[in-house]
Image (spheres, rainbow, N blue to C red):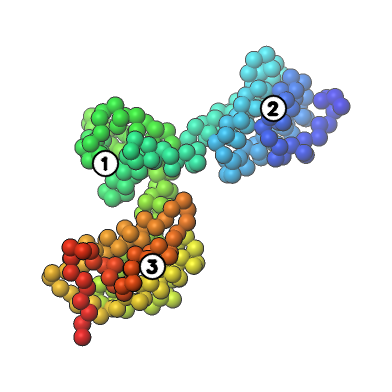
Amino acid sequence: MSLQQHLDLSHLDTVAADEIAPVVERVAAEADADNLARLTDLLLDRALRLLREGSREEILDEALAISGGVSGETGRVLRERSPETFGAWAALDDLLAEAARRSDRAAVPSLLRSIEGHGLKVLELLAEKGQAVPRAEIRERLNLAEAHLSHLLRDLEEADLIVRYRVQGKREVLVELGRVGREEVERAVLPAWLERLASALTEIAAGSPVDFETLAQELRRAGAPSELAAVKLAEALARIPSTVTKSSDYPASANLLQFVQKTANLREDGTFRFQEMLDLQDGRSPRALFHTEDEPAIKASA
């Protein structure tokens, strides 16, 4: 069927980029107005889907497929016969290429582990401060050589994990969380459910009782990994006696933090290992998790 006739594009909605590429080049070379318009609509729909769901590789392949219609002799013909279509396809090509470069979520974990895990340490530092941090402070806290720090911050910025900028009139470079960085902090570094868990531990240490059903609901609403996760955590905390006596020889805040850190570290590869949390008790009562070998255990009032 000649491309000057009505072109059936219905089967191309979700095909791989290597199948759409020859169609793009043929339609561009023919430059039939009707087919160009319908293919443009299809490419836009495909791009929106890929930006929502696609991997970096799929997005990059789509960009290369569209590039075949706006480069070389084919691109020259399309520019002459339909400059509007050429402009739209070129802009879509640039958008997808940029998205592929900046939005590789699969690469984020490996990037954060790079240079001995210093990528994650940068996010933790920024999350702890809650505001922009001078570049010099990051270098001092991480004890990194200048070349390593420059390389690390560049990679983090390209992934939109951080943003670097200078305040007008000052030479100091400031670093703060980027869009992806904020999402990563909320997802894994300091999720809302973990903050609620920490506050519940503080309430217990202060002698306030915990209703596990209410706490389970609050943990779930705060984004706990699953409903079962929320229930198991709430039940474990509810078993800790609320009649805790305050004592100057018991560093409660330090041990509460230790317990929260132990709990947080149970997350691995997107799962949550509750049995391992219970194993930490080693046959002791749940409150035993609140002290270390070098610190006295929690004392319950009579």
Rendering coords of residue 254 (x, y %):
22, 62
Q: Are marks 1 and 3 in contact (CB under 8 Å)?
A: no
Rendering coords of residue 138 (x, y %):
25, 38
Residue labelled with disc 1: 133
Q: Which mark is residue 21?
A: 2
Is residue 92 or residue 199 the one in the foreground?
199
Rendering coords of residue 108 (x, y %):
44, 41
Q: Which mark is residue 278?
A: 3
Secondary structure type for disc 1: strand
Say which of marks 2 and 1 sits in front: 2
- The quadrant in which residue 57 appears is top right
Q: Are marks 2 and 3 in contact (CB under 8 Å)?
A: no
217 w.r.t. 4: above or below: below
Is residue 110 or residue 295 the one in the foreground?
295
Distance of label 2 from label 1 (alpha carbons): 45 Å
Rendering coords of residue 156 (x, y %):
38, 36
- The quadrant in which residue 275 appears is bottom left
* Residue in the picture at 59% in, 41% down: 54
Name the amino acid, label 2.
Ala
Distance of label 2 from label 3 (alpha carbons): 55 Å
